Image (tube, rainbow, N blue to C red):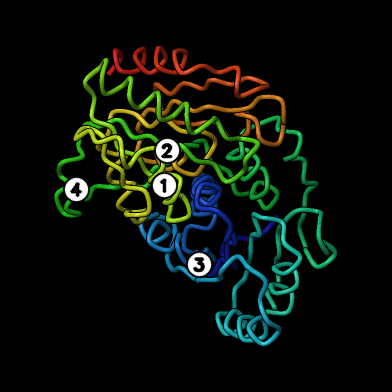
Amino acid sequence: MINSLNVEKILVVRNDRFGEFLLIIPALRALKEKFKDAKIFAVVNPYVKELAEVIPYIDEVIIWENRKHKFGEIILFIHKLRKEKFDLCIIFNPSKEFNIVCFLAGIPIRVGYARKWDFLLTHKIEDKKYLGLKHEIDYNLELVGIIGANTNDKSLNLGIKRDINVLGIENYKDSIVVHPWTSDKIKQWPVENFRDLVIKLVEELNEKVIIIGGKENLNISNKYFHNLNNKKIIDLTGKTTLLALAVILKNSKILISGDSGPVHLASCVNTPVLAIFRNDIPAKSPIRWGPRSKKSIVIAKNNLNDITVEEVFNRVKEVLQLL
């Protein structure tokens, strides 16, 4: 067992998508509870930096883009980490690159999964995430558990307190937020269905709807939503930072989304989620990736085309009646 008194600086690595990153929050809490006096440094993708900075368990943020790096860049990064003299590192997303980097940076305790040059790790467990037997949060806790870091608190909480007026989005309070996109086509409920759902929410329930998404979704968002010409439909696709999005979600009634990062961001601010999932692929199932906020609902079928607009609309009404 690792003596917590000997650990002063911890490096955690999760530099892929922001949704995956948010799901390490309980594991970070466990590390803080085990190593009370240690500082935690988090390696994240650049666009995740502002979210990482509001997580209370993270003391410093290190930027390392999730892409293929030149040899010289890697050498400079290794030198940067070596200067920090970390005592312990946790590699949450299995990575040959980081297994090598953390070894060459001289970090004595290296924790990760038994994959991708895992002989460079000092503590490791088999990667069974592909089985989808439990939530990603629990897989992350299992990883830090091998060094004695545990917690009974599995909650996601960013502690966002910033008033919505500060961000100049005061008109968006008490809206329904819709995120019609996913990073993987096999998880995509048809965008046409999202559009028809938005129209029903506005016309039949008189709700205000906000469309969100990244800049990569702009063209298709313009095609389906921007020209609906309804003042109650606000298309913010490509127009918000992640922190601004967190504030919007905190002040909204519900998020409607496929399997994507905003599902977990909504969980972090305790906003109800209606999530649309496939349930025939264990590694991508709602068991592993479902929302954790209260009053949330998952609609999951083997074929997403079997999920109708009317079915989703009726389930949204159920959630709204509970608010």
Q: Earlier in the sequence, mark 1 or mark 4?
A: 4
Q: Earlier in the sequence, mark 3 or mark 4?
A: 3
Q: Which residue is mark 4?
A: 169
Q: Residue at x 43, y 56 (%)?
A: 215
Judge left or right: residue 10 versus residue 186. left
Q: Which residue is mark 3?
A: 41
Residue 299 lies, in percent from the top left, at: 53, 20
Residues at marks 1 and 4, CA–CA distance in whole angstroms: 16 Å
Q: Earlier in the sequence, mark 1 or mark 3?
A: 3
Residue 70 lies, in percent from the top left, at: 68, 81
Q: Earlier in the sequence, mark 2 or mark 1?
A: 2
Residues at marks 2 and 3, CA–CA distance in whole angstroms: 31 Å
Judge left or right: residue 228 versus residue 37. left
Residue 143 lies, in percent from the top left, at: 67, 48
Please report contact status of discs 1 and 3: CB closer than 8 Å, yes or no.
no
Does the rendering let one see residue 159?
Answer: no
Quarter assignment of residue 233: top left
Q: Residues within 10 Å of mark 2 (few under 14, many from 20)?
A: many
Q: Amino acid at mark 3?
A: Phe
Residues at marks 2 and 1, CA–CA distance in whole angstroms: 6 Å
Q: Which mark is residue 179?
A: 2
Residue 302, above or below 153: above
- The quarter in which the C terminus is drawn is top left
Quarter assignment of residue 120: bottom right
Of residues 147 and 67, the one nearer the viewer is 67
Q: Which residue is mark 1?
A: 213
Q: Amino acid at mark 2?
A: His
